[in-house]
Structures are given as structure tokens and as C-alpha cells.
Image (tube, rainbow, N blue to C red):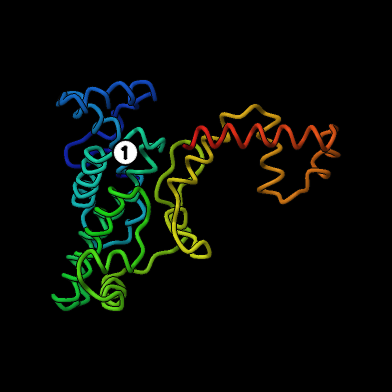
Amino acid sequence: MAGYKVEICGVNTSQLPLLKEEEKAELFKRIKAGDEEARKRYIEGNLRLVLSVIQRFSNANEHIDDLFQIGCVGLIKAIDNFNPDMMVKFSTYAVPMIVGEVRRFLRDNNTIRVSRSLRDIAYKAIYAKEELMKRSLKEPTICEIANEIGVSKEEIVYALDAIQSPVSLYDPVYTDGGDTLYMMDQISDKTQKEDKWVEDLALEEAMRRLPDRERSIIKKRFFDGKTQMEVAEEIHISQAQVSRLEKNALKSMRKYLS
């Protein structure tokens, strides 16, 4: 997709700005205060994100300019609805919204005919899901979406399946100079019944705030499944010390998460 680095919709992609984290934070404060110039700069500073996301739709029979414009709509929605107090990176929040906006556009232009009634139910479910996520900060269940729009859960599942386009779980959706974000990263773990990605991100942030030794103990105990005695032998301290450090770490994490 070399064309992405030339010009799209009149945008010279090789000259797109890159915002530093401190710049993003400052711009977002100004955006919340109603500064339109800051909003414009924030949009321009995240256009590379849109370009990265729409690369996964390169096989779609749509003009690249159209996909870029639709992706920008998703980006703007993400900016208008993002809450930095959620302790989530903006790109983590924005990518699913951009992907969703592009996929809705492609569904509307899909050559496979889906009945209008099914399409209406599917779109109502999608919009209801977004609203429920804003209110509860977690992925809603099918039952919750069904109650929200007054449709049976079976109808919702059938309607959503009817408008889906098959994708690979390993399709990359964004790369920011480091680890690649794949489609599978945006899908909930059904073995846990319900997606709690916001809580997981908060937990990760709480662990990062721990001292190195306490963070290591928590990881070994609760992620690697080791006993306190095994941890004690591994890091060469007593089991009583492991127990004390573990309790202090859990107390600190609970305080941060509360």
C-alpha cells in the first residue's frame, strides 16, 4: 500500500505530524475546554492511526479516499467521546471505533443483499452496544443489548451474523512503532463470560505502579500460579517475607483501583 504515503483526500501523508504524549495530554485539555484549533491539531496528529487501520481493508473494492474519509469519521467520534480518566491509551480506544465505522460503510455497500429489517436490527444493536459501553465502561452482553432495543437476543445474533464480513483474527489493525495490534486483540475472551478490557488495563496500570520486587511477586503468584514457598526459593527470601510483600502489593493495588 505504498500509495498511503503519497496523498489521500488532498492530505500529504509524508508530512503528517507526530504528537508526543505530553502534547496529546495538553491538546486534550484544550479540546475539553472547547478549543477548536486544538481539536483540529489532535485530528491531524492521529491521521496516521486512520491510515494504519484502513490498510487491513486493502482487499475491499472501495476507493482508498473513501475509506480514509470514513476512517476519519471514526477518529473524530473517538476524540469526541474519549475520556482520558479511563487510564486507556487513546489509540486503544480509537482503533475499534475506526474499524467499526469502516465496516459499517462496507456493509452498506455490500453486494450481498441483506433484508432491510435485518440490517435495521443489526445497526440498532451496534449503536446500542456503543451507548452501553459509554455508560458502563465494559462490553455489554447480548441480553443487555436485547433489553436496550426491545428485540430478542436470537434476532440480534442472526442480524449481526447476516451483515458480517469474514476476517482473520491475525489481521493487523494498527502498528505504532512497537507491538502490532491485531483483530484478535479486540475480541473478548468468552471463557471469562464477559469482556472486562477496561478493568484489565486498570489492573495492568496498578501493577506498573508497584516496586519491581512486589510486581514480580504478584506476577509469579497470580499469573504464573506459583506458591509463596516457590516464589521465596526463586528470589531468595523467606516465605514470610513473600507473604508480607504480597499483602502490601495487593493493598496498594486495591487502593489504586478503588
**Res 50 quadrant in image:** top left
**Res 210 quadrant in image:** top right
What residue is at 45 percent from the left and 52 percent from the top?
196
Any part of residue 171 in sight: no
What residue is at 36 percent from the left and 33 percent from the top?
85
Q: Position of residue 113 (x, y in %)?
A: 19, 77
Q: Position of residue 242 (x, y in %)?
A: 77, 35
Q: Is residue 201 above or below residue 31?
A: below
What residue is at 62 percent from the left and 37 percent from the top?
250
Q: What is the three-letter code of the residue carrying label 1?
A: Lys
Any part of residue 186 in sight: yes
Is residue 226 shown left or right of residue 128?
right
**Res 83 quadrant in image:** top left
Question: Which is nearer the eye, 228 or 78?
Answer: 228
Question: Which is nearer the eye, 202 or 242?
Answer: 242
Q: Residue tagged by mark 1? A: 5
Is residue 187 shown left or right of residue 142?
right
Q: Position of residue 257 (x, y in %)?
A: 48, 37
Is residue 250 shown left or right of residue 32?
right
Q: Position of residue 233 (x, y in %)?
A: 86, 39
Q: Secondary structure at mark 1?
A: helix
